[in-house]
Image (tube, grey):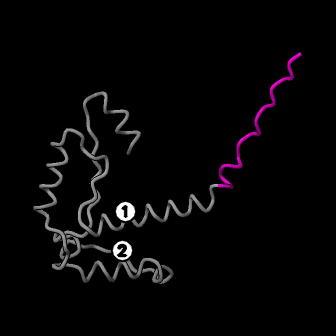
């Protein structure tokens, strides 16, 4: 995303990645088509499959307000690169960032130890 924005920015093209949470659309209703269930994935994907089928009509997000937020971002002098929409999207992204931060901090010593040792300066005569 960031490399694309940097590449096309000088051409006057702005990039905004919209990351929506659950909005009251037909996405999880009549238009929902799911692949065949695979038992091996029941523990990982199963809860999401169940959640999405029971979500229709009770999603917290209002599509009209989402559209207005997208238009506002596009009209902004400095639009965001990422635009999460809905409290669930914001909370999910912040949770992910906290998890990434914790993991990087846990492994930073290993990561930093991959550099070549400093080159010794030659002794002066």
Q: What stretch is highlighted in magenta?
A: 109-125
Residues packed near mark 2 inside 10 Å, few (<14), some (14 to 19) or many (20 plus)? few
- The quarter of the image holding the N terminus is top left
Labels 1 and 2: the sequence-earlier one: 2
The answer to which quarter of the image holds residue 78 is top left
- The quarter of the image holding the C terminus is top right
Residue at (27%, 73%) from the top-left corner? 33
Q: Is residue 75 magenta?
A: no
Residue furthest front in the image = 125
Q: Look at mark 2 in the image and give the residue it sits on.
A: 35
The answer to which quarter of the image holds residue 123 is top right
Residue at (31%, 28%) from the top-left corner? 10
Q: Look at mark 1 in the image and give the residue it sits on.
A: 93
Q: Which of 118 and 116 is in front in this view?
A: 118
Q: Which of 83 and 50 is in front in this view?
A: 83
Residue at (45%, 64%) from the top-left corner? 98
User: Of helix, strand and loop, which one carries label 1?
Assistant: helix
């Amino acid at each position: 995303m960031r490399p694309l924005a940097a590449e096309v920015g000088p051409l006057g093209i702005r990039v905004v990645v919209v990351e929506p949470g659950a909005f009251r659309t037909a996405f999880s209703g009549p238009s929902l088509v799911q692949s065949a269930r695979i038992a091996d994935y029941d523990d990982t994907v199963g809860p999401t499959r169940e959640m999405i089928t029971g979500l229709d009509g009770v999603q917290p997000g209002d599509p009209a307000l989402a559209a207005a937020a997208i238009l506002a971002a596009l009209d902004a002098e400095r639009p965001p690169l990422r635009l999460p929409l809905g409290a669930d999207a914001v909370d999910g992204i912040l949770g992910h960032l906290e998890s990434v931060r914790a993991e990087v901090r846990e492994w930073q010593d290993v990561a930093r130890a991959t550099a070549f040792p400093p080159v010794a300066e030659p002794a002066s005569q």
